[in-house]
Amino acid sequence: MNALRVENITKTYDSFKAVDNISFSIQEGRLFGLLGPNGAGKTTTMRMIMNIIIPDSGKIFLFDETFTEKHKDIIGYLPEERGLYPKMTLIDHLQFLGEMKGMSSTEAKKISLQWLGRFNLLEWEGKKIQELSKGMQQKVQFIATIMHSPKLLILDEPFSGLDPVNTKFLKDILMQLKQEGATIILSTHLMDQAEKLCDDICLINKGRVVIQGNLREKKEEYGHNSVILEYSGDASFVRNLSMVEKLNDYGNYMAIQLKDGSTPHQLFQILAGKKFEVKKFEAAETSLNEIFIDIVGGKSHG
């Protein structure tokens, strides 16, 4: 069964078309990346899925049903613009939000305390929200999103503002929820995170779908003949080699895209005859970030 099916949705504000005839579907238990640059239409799309905004045209189905109030209790939605009540204590706030999702008062408090313990926030349970750091508040909002064990999670830029340690912790939680059967929509413009996490993707730009499907298949379809080179010494000559299509030089590290017809082996033979040290030479698959830059930056595939 599809957890979500979006059919030809469109949303226009005055003369600006924020979402233009978008369609995609997500199977249950998958982690789906709704990707695109800032302003692409991702947040508008998610708000239409949540029935916060009504599409001008098109249809949205949740678990093969049109959206009703009952679906709100099986969805966890983390908006990009976080919103908590600053005067409430942490535990009261989570208990209140749990009850809003259909949990009993006792169950909401019990589950809240369990998650606070896991997030190392138990000692803060009696503090007001306004006394917490922004990072702590983000953890609280995330707990509020998942504490009722939703079947569908919709996360808008969930890693925004988190340090690497907390980003990894959040990622581990998402992997656990997926293993337990949750369907997860991850909206982000951070391609490295999406590449590590997503099963399927839908990349939108200027309100339109430009790529969608299985992530592995799309990486193969849009893949380049690429090489990763780590070195010491002067490797500036590589940029001028006729076989090089594109090169990003970070100083002692290069990401090299070769022209069609050239091979990594041919490049290695050239490098072997030069007076500099090759520390790492690796034929690399094209990253999602490179595909994103090519497509959104205006370079057409092929």
Image (cartoon, rainbow, N blue to C red):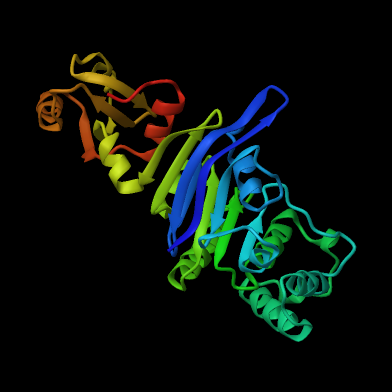
Q: Report whether 212 appears left or right of 131.
A: left
The one nearer the camera, 203 or 257, is 203
Q: Quadrant of residue 170?
A: bottom right
The x and y percentages for residue 181 are 46, 70
Q: Which residue is drawn at 30% across and 21% down?
A: 246
Identify the residue at horizontal 73%, vertical 79% (top origin).
108
When the figure is inspected, residue 261 is found, relative to residue 284, above or below; the finding is above
Establish if 265 lies above or below 3. above
The residue positioned 36% from the left and 26% from the top of the image is 249
Image quarter hosting the C terminus: top left
**Residue 300 appears in the rendering:** yes
| Residue 91 horizontal/vertical position (percent) | 79, 74
Picture mark count: 0
Q: Can residue 193 be seen in this view?
A: no
Residue 268 location, quadrant: top left
**Residue 271 horizontal/vertical position (percent):** 15, 26
Query: Which residue occupies the foreground of this view, 31 or 127?
Result: 31
- Left or right, residue 273 beside residue 297: left
Residue 283 horizontal/vertical position (percent):
20, 38
Q: In this view, does 159 lie above or below 204?
A: below
From the viewer's side, name the closer residue of 118 and 17: 17
The residue shown at (52%, 63%) is 63
